[in-house]
Amino acid sequence: MKSINIFASLMLVLFAGTGMLITFSSFYTNPEPTGTLKKRIAEDSTLFPQNYKIISPKIEGKYFFCGEEVPVKNIDVKERLERELIVNTYWHSLTLLSLKRAHRWFPVIEPILKKHNVPDDFKYLALVESMLTNAVSPAGAVGFWQFKEDAAREYGLEINSEIDERYHIEKATEAACKYLTDSYKKYGNWTLAAASYNYGKSGIDNQIEKQKSNNYYNLVLPEETSRYIFRIVAIKEIFKNPKRFGFYFDEKNLYQPYKTYEVAVNKEVKSWADFAKAHGINYRILKLLNPWLRKHYLKNKKRKTYKIKLPVEGSIYVIPG
């Protein structure tokens, strides 16, 4: 009983802030609000502002990935898609953050995909891979597109002690497009090309040979790869119509693209912090815009030219000091 009294006190404090004092006993003895309490809830939208309900998203109509139909008439396929729709609908914090981040980064990714004739749906692959953060996986995959070192080098990204272009969103997107284009040429469809991005071409090849099938939806694959396309399709569906899945937000609260210009650097930089201050910002903002700079200096012995992003004046508030 002591624990219940403590919880009751907490509930009183919580609801006192709304101007609508409701005792714990109302909830404890009446799980379904009735009478006066029910009327209060109906009249005062601030009491439960999100009108929260747990429902199962409907699987209806047709679903597509890169123009290729997802065969939801198959009960196994339908349930695999439903799983990802439920997970991403009710993993509110992560999906809401993804919606916010996408507003900043999709405008960077989309024109690069278009330039390489890679379907626009692949922007959701980047989101599923990293949630549009410069993540580092336990397996050593890095950046928005989660490149491992060998694949990154194979597709033209520079990696050394001072530079890691897996963190360079434009260059990493270019590399991902090259990988996906090669995979499409190999498999003849974008669904297997996407699966190979997660499992590797050799992994997909081995399973096709063992299982005598070249259809992604028929293959028995490791769980992550088996869920992979469905995660992408689920996120795509939520992004197409967020309100249908319970996500409401003001456009002004989405993260805006950074406004930047570039400065060419083709020599040694002894201190990026000094470089940043000379351009009216600080080291943190410099790293925010150029996360591919991995040291606080650049020896640049080969005198390569690097383009450093800097914020347009007034677009980012610089904290003094």
Image: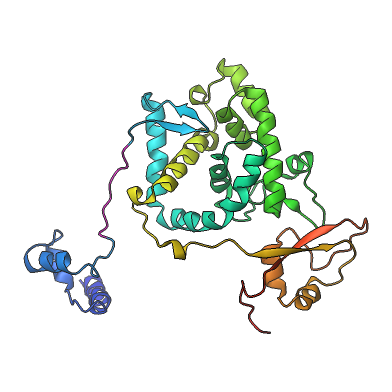
- Which residue corresponds to the image point at 17% horizontal and 74% vertical from the top-left? 22
The chosen color scheme is rainbow
Decide which of 236, 154 is in the foreground and name it: 236
Q: Quadrant of the N terminus?
A: bottom left
Q: Residue furthest bottom?
A: 321
Judged from this view, the residue extending furthest toward the top is 212
Looking at the image, residue 143 lies above or below residue 269: above
The answer to whether residue 193 is seen in the rendering is yes
Viewport quadrant of the C terminus:
bottom right
Q: Residue visible at 79% across and 51% down?
A: 159
Give the extent of the magenta segment.
51-58
- Give the tally of numbered discs: 0
Res. 27 visible in picture: no
Q: Quadrant of residue 33?
A: bottom left
Q: Is residue 221 magenta?
A: no
Q: Position of residue 183 (x, y in %)?
A: 66, 29
Residue 89 x %, y %: 38, 48
Tell me which secondary structure the magenta stretch mostly adopts: loop
**Residue that appears at 78% across and 38% down:** 154
Q: Work out whether 7 lies above or below 196.
A: below
The x and y percentages for residue 30 are: 12, 62
Q: Quadrant of residue 135?
A: bottom right
Q: Is residue 206 above or below residue 56?
A: above
Q: Where residue 132 appears, x then y in whole percent?
A: 57, 53
Query: Which residue appears farthest toward the left when viewing the image?
Result: 35
Depicted 258 relative to depicted 118: above or below = below
In-image side of 42 versus 260 (left or right): left
Residue nearest the viewer, comparing 256 with 156: 256
Horizontal side, residue 163 vs residue 95: left or right: right
Q: Residue at x 54, y 52 (%)?
A: 131
